[in-house]
Image: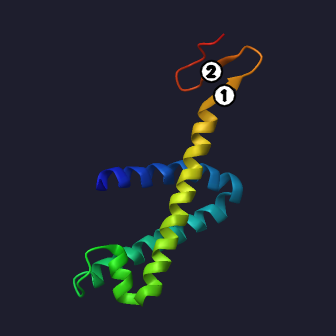
Amino acid sequence: AVFNIATTMIGAGIMSIPATFKVLGVIPALIVILIVALMGDVTGEFILRYTHSGKSTTYAGLMAESFGPVGSVALQICVMITSFGCLIIYLIIIGKSYSIDVLELSVHFKIFGDFGS
């Protein structure tokens, strides 16, 4: 399960980098990537520092111990927003992978090549 989640996160991150550069430009996109990397580093250190001091075994439990119920709810909201964003990215990828040619009434799969014509 851990490897599946890790590959999903890495895959979604890699798929969103070109869109980030296209929308923001090179310099702002690099700044955003550096900010996200810094936040990941701070989060990792936070987890390592406070995991052994309490009784929590999950990330939500760690947030509840550190910030109370508000922190746990805030974490759950952030996870929902991130999951929704990943869903949108995957739907965009699926939408760009398939196209329907209405005039010929055939379906072309760009992944496998053009078999309809």
- Image quadrant in which you'd find residue 46: bottom left
**Percent position (x, y) of residue 82?**
52, 63
In this figure, which residue is indicated by the disc labeled 2? 108
Task: State whether residue 45 appears in this view.
Answer: no
Most foreground residue, 101 or 30: 101
Left or right: where 93 falls relative to 68: right
Q: Residue 2, which numbered label? A: none
Q: Residues within 10 Å of mark 1 (few under 14, many from 20)?
A: few
The mark that comes first in sequence, 1 or 2, is: 1
The residue closer to the viewer here, 26 or 47, is: 47
Viewer-proximal residue among 4 and 105 = 105
Three-letter amino acid code at disc 2? His
Image point 57% across, 49% down: which residue? 89
Q: Residue at x 42, y 50 (%)?
A: 8
Quadrant in the rendering for residue 71: bottom left
Spot occupied by residue 104 in the image (x, y as percentages of width and height): 73, 13
Considering only vertical position in the picture, is 28 above or below 75?
Answer: above
- CB-based contact (under 8 Å), mark 1 and mark 2: yes
Badge 1 amino acid = Ser
Q: How is the image coloured?
A: rainbow
Marks 1 and 2, Cα distance to the nearest angstrom? Answer: 6 Å
Expressed as whole percent of the image width and height from the top left, the position of residue 78 reads 51, 71
| Element type at mark 1 | strand
Q: Is residue 115 left or right of residue 72?
A: right
At 54% from the left edge and 26% from the top edge, which residue is drawn?
A: 111
Residue found at the very far top of the displayed protein: 117
Which residue is the site of mark 1? 99
Residue 101, quarter of picture: top right
